[in-house]
Image (cartoon, helix red, strand yellow):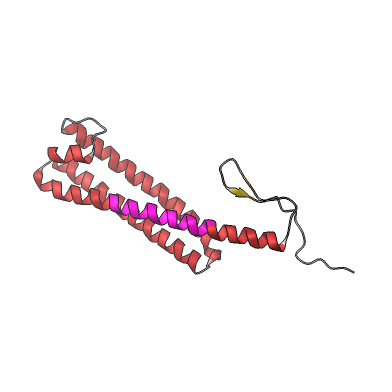
Amino acid sequence: MIELLNHLVDSLREELKQYGEMLALMDQQQEMVLQRHTQDLLQTVAIINAQSATIQGARHERQQRQRHLARTVGLADDATFQELLPRVLADYRPLLSALVEENNALLERIQHRARQNHLLLSRALDLMNRFLGELFPAAGATTYNGAGSLVGPALAPRPVLEVVG
């Protein structure tokens, strides 16, 4: 059982590390938006998407190890950590509990930062759409699409400078 516990601890640590890296990336993205470093913003989105895939892999590995330990101590595969902790060796309970709490806290911070970044990016996009609407007025009004998002009329391509000659 000690080997299974050590594997679970390792996977919880790896998951925590990946969450920490995601939070750092989201902080970086937020700073780019606030400092108007738009040239690097698309690259950041790609890196965040890649980190999300890495997190999914780490989470999957931890869940497999958690299920294996649950079966070993006589619990169902979908046993929660609250159900699992009383069944493991007492020396491991504080460590497992602390890692689970840290993972949950970091995940909440990531979700909060993601909402903040979404709002910032949405606001920046809205401002750009308004700017383009003023620069290139088009016939028609702004409407809502089926998802509830604002959609402006399609802009016909126009030259930035029209020369009369």
User: Which residue shows up at 50% across the image and 69% down it?
Assistant: 35
- Name the quarter where the N terminus is drawn: top left
- In the visual, does 77 lie left or right of 119? left
Residue 14 seen by the camera: no
The residue lying furthest to the right in this view is 165
Q: Which is more toward the observer, 137 or 97?
A: 137
Magenta-colored span: 104-122
Residue 114 inside the magenta-drawn segment: yes
Residue that protrudes farthest toward the left in the picture: 90
> Relative to residue 21, is residue 68 drawn left or right?
left
Q: Image height check: is 75 above or below 147?
A: above
Say if 153 sits above or below 164 in the image: above
Magenta stretch: residue 127 in it?
Answer: no
Q: Is residue 143 left or right of residue 77?
A: right
- The spot of residue 151 in percent (x, y) is 63, 49
Kindly identify the residue that appears in the image at 46 percent across and 61 percent down. Answer: 29
Nearer to me, 100 or 124: 124
How far across and how far down the image is residue 65, in percent?
A: 25, 39
Q: Main secondary structure of the magenta part?
A: helix
Is 73 drawn above or below residue 53 in the view shown?
above
* Quadrant assignment for the C terminus: bottom right
* Residue 123: x %, y % from top left: 54, 59
Rendering quarter of residue 113: bottom left
The residue closer to the viewer here, 117 or 89, is 117
